[in-house]
Amino acid sequence: MRHTLTIKMQSRKYSVIIESGLFQNIGKILGERFAGKKIALITDENIQQLYENLLKKQLDASQCDWEIIALPPGDTSKSFDTLTVIYKRLIEFQITRDDVIVALGGGVVGDISGFAAATFLRGIEFVQIPTTLIGQVDSSIGGKNAVNLPEGKNLVGTFYQPTCVYIDPDFVKTLSDYHFADGMAEIIKYACVADADLFSDLIRMKSHREAKLIESIIYRCCLIKKQLIEQDEKDQGVRMLTNFGHTIGHAIENLYDFRLYGHGQAVAIGMQTITEHSEAMGLTAINTSAMLKEVLTEYGLPAELPQGIDRKLLAQTAMKDKKRRGNKINLVLIEKIGKGYIYPIEKAELIKFIE
Ligand code: NAD
Ligand code: ZN
């Protein structure tokens, strides 16, 4: 079943289309929408290898001039070195401001392509076709993009909305269990801050990877994200709820050099840690952390801080997060399952939520 959402941002209005099998017809869709334009499709080498024949067939079907730019997979591709390669390829392909960049991939491809689209020739049209669960429920919508610096992740970026987002839940079928679980963490996050029914459904769901169920779950998450970002395009109010678990999560990723834990795994630990503490302080309803732990465990996600972790160092690392403003941190807590809220604290108080 096809779901269409219209995202109404101040800077642009655009559609998010969610439908299993959509990619089987993407050439025709792109061809109709971008007739006469050139398509520079940015992807990573894993996706290129997995979907090569279908991808070329679809690009041919668009009847547009096209070129594929395939990046090495992984977060190291979110760098200024990679950007230089992308800009060079766009120039060689003689891309103009009338043409379009299509991002086919996970959050890495989406983030670097979005930044390239926002900056090349001061901005050209940009389409997202997310292929990971994180991409489909989170990173492809909302217009945030970023590149990493040696000093830290996502330190340079812009807000730049796509022209359209095409989500084909069938892509999830080829994801590894590890990356699937990573995406589930973000889904559990949405359920915790905004949708108690989704949380109950996640508990009830038996066959986690069944395509039909995934399609409707992706839709519900996109709907939640739509509602949050439309009210707060620049991440200064309710959109911050999408950061639940991320203050501690980012710090864990940092401390372990982005190797030991995927983004979702680190966020899972972050959500559980913060909720155990907020519950003990009377800021969250009793039994919430037990329910959260049950769901995280069910979906193969870690729910405990790593053994022997230096909690003071973790708190110090979290305090350096770019989302910190002055001496304050806007912590996201949940009042109960399905209801998140922002709880500003002095940065020195963060340790109370970790120790
Ligand atoms: P990713 O893009 O690295 O993808 C994970 C892995 O899955 C890669 O190895 C990739 O090659 C592979 N892959 C992608 N699609 C596949 C498919 N259909 N089948 C098999 N393998 C596939 O990472 P991700 O987890 O999608 O995203 C993480 C990145 O997204 C981080 O850099 C994070 O900062 C960023 N992010 C951005 C936002 C945002 O709002 N802009 C939000 C969340 C995360
Ligand atoms: Zn996240």
Image (spheres, grey):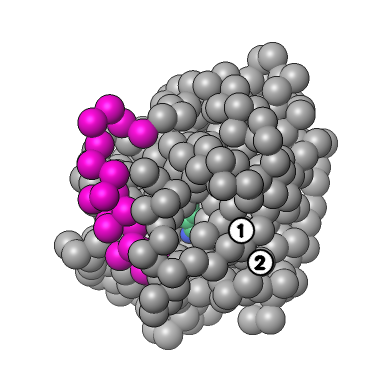
Q: Is residue 299 positioned above or below 316 on the image? A: above
The residue sitting at 42% across, 51% down in the picture is 352
The residue sitting at 69% across, 81% down in the picture is 10
Q: Position of residue 42 (x, y in %)?
A: 40, 55
Q: Which residue is mark 1?
A: 241
Instruction: Pick out the residue farthest to the bottom.
Output: 122
- The answer to whether residue 300 of the structure is visible from this angle is yes
Q: Which residue is mark 2?
A: 238
Q: Is residue 6 left or right of residue 168?
A: right
Q: Position of residue 319 (x, y in %)?
A: 33, 63
Name the one closer to the observer, 171 or 240.
Answer: 240
Mark 2: amino acid: Val
Q: Are marks 2 and 1 in contact (CB under 8 Å)?
A: yes
Q: Position of residue 303 (x, y in %)?
A: 46, 29
Instruction: Pick out the residue farthest to the top.
Output: 206
Q: Is residue 158 positioned above or below 194 on the image? A: below
Name the one closer to the observer, 316 or 198.
Answer: 316
Name the one closer to the observer, 348 or 298.
Answer: 348
Name the one closer to the observer, 225 or 73.
Answer: 225
Mark 1: amino acid: Leu
Q: Position of residue 263 (x, y in %)?
A: 40, 43
Q: Is residue 306 positioned above or below 207 on the image? A: below
Q: Is residue 105 left or right of residue 198?
A: left
The residue sitting at 67% across, 31% down in the picture is 287
- The answer to whether residue 157 of the structure is visible from this angle is no
Task: Work out which quarter of the rendered image holds the C terminus and state it.
Answer: top left
Magenta stretch? Answer: 305-323
